[in-house]
Amino acid sequence: MDSKEVLIWLNSIRGVTNKTIDNLEKHYGNISFLWKASNNEVNELKFLNDKIKSEIIKNKNIEYYNKQRQKIQQLDLKVLTVYDDNYPEHLKSIYNCPKVLYIKGEIKEEDSLSISIVGSRKATAYGRWAAAKFAEELAEMGITIISGMAKGVDTVAHLGAIQAKGRTLAILGSGVDVIYPKSNRQLYSDIFSNGAVISEFPLGTQPLQYNFPQRNRIISGLSLGVIVIEAGEKSGSLITAHHAIEQGKDVFALPGNINSVYSKGTNLLIKDGAKILTSLDDILEEIQILKDKCSYYNKKTIDYECLGVDEEKIVKSLVEKPLHMDMISYNCNMSISEVTSLLTILEMKGIVKQLPGKIFTIT
C-alpha cells in the first residue's frame, strides 16, 4: 500500500478527519507506515481517541480496501489526493484543503479559470434571473461555473453554464454517489456530462447539515472569485463568502431591495467591502486573468472582415470593456450621430448590444 492508497483507505473510515490525517502524517512522516503498524502500535497513539483507533484496527485489511476500490470502479469515479500532481492548484493552497476528492466526470486544466456562484435556496425571480445571466455570460467566455447543486441559485447557475455550452462543477455536501436534493437527479447527470460532480466525503455519506459549511471552503477554494446572488443574514452563502475572503479571493455581491430578507446578506457583504455586482465588467475589472481571457475571446470570435472601417473602430473600442456612447465617440473620433448610426447597424448584425444608460458592449 503506497501513500495514496493508504490515504484513500483512511478517508473512507468513519470518524477520520483531516486533522486525524495531519496528526498521523506528523507522527509517521510517511502515512503509508500506518498500514504496516501493529494493532498495539495503533493503540499507543495518544492523539487518537479509542473510537478512531478501533475503527482503524477493524478496517486495516486488504479486503476492506478492495471493497472501497470496487465501489469506486463500479460508479466510474476518479479519485484525486493531495499527493497527486494533477490535484487542483487553487485548492491545494487553501487552509485545511481536502485530502481526497471523489469525482464523477472530469476536472480539466481549463477549470482553473472559474467563478463560483452561490445564493439562496428560495431565490426570488430577480435572483434566478441574475444567476442565469452571469452564469451564461461567464460560461460563454469559457469560464467554468462552480456551485453546490442546491435548489434555487445553485441550480440556476449550473443550468446557465450548461445552456451556454460551458463547463460547470458541483461540490456536494454528501458522498458523490448521494444525489441531493433528489429533484436534481437529471441536473446531476447533466453536470458530470459537462464538467464534474465532486465531494471530499466518503461514498454513501448522507447530506447532513454540518457537512455543508465544510464543503463551502471547496466551492470558494476552487475558484478565482465568488458571486453571492441572494442571501439572508444567516445564509450558508455567507460562509462561502467568508471562506473566499480568508483565501484571498474576490467576493462580488448582487445588491438587492433593502426590504427583502433575501438581500440582507448580500447588502451586508457590500457594506463590509465586497464588490458591488451590476455587470460582468465588475468582475473583469477585479480579476485580471479573466479580463485578459475576455479580451482574447472577443478578438478571437469577432469576424472583422465583415465590418467596415468605422464599424471595426467601434468594435475594437468595445473589446476590452463596455463603454458609454459618449466615450465611444471620443475614442473613435466620431460624432454622436455617426456613432449612433453605426451602433444601430452593429446591433442588427448581432455584434454589439445596448445596456441601460446608453452603454454598449460586445454581444
Image: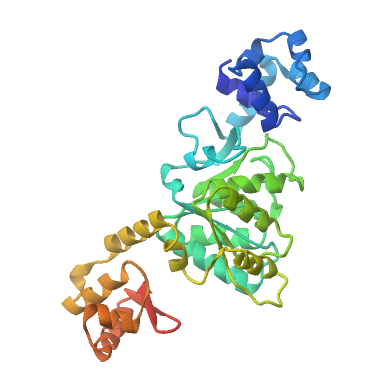
Q: Quadrant of residue 351?
A: bottom left
- Residue 166 visible here: yes
- Left or right of 298, for residue 166: right
Judging depth in this view, the residue of 351 and 331 nearest the camera is 331
Residue 352's place in the image compared with 53, above or below, is below
Q: Is any part of residue 230 visible from this angle?
A: no
Residue at left offset 53%, top offset 68%: 277
Give the answer, above or below, for where 269 lies relative to 179. below
Give coordinates of residue 36: x percent, y percent: 65, 10
Q: Position of residue 156 (x, y in %)?
A: 59, 62
Q: Going by the picture, which residue comes out furthest to the right?
A: 50
Based on the displayed image, in which of its 4 quarters is residue 253 positioned?
bottom right
Q: Position of residue 204 (x, y in %)?
A: 71, 36
Left or right: 348 in relation to 142:
left
Residue pictured at 58% horizontal, 69% vertical: 254
* Residue 63 drawn above or below residue 187: above
Q: x and y percent of residue 281 in the render? A: 43, 67
Residue drawn at point x = 46 percent, y = 34 percent: 86
Which residue of the protein is positioned furthest toward the front in this rendering?
A: 272
Q: Which quarter of the image is occupied by the C terminus?
A: bottom left
Q: Quick check: 226 above or below 25? A: below
Q: Residue at x 69, y 14 (%)?
A: 61
Question: Which quadrant holds the N terminus?
Answer: top right
Residue projecting furthest to the bottom: 337
Give the total number of marks visible in the rendering: 0
Colour theme: rainbow
Q: Quadrant of residue 285?
A: bottom left
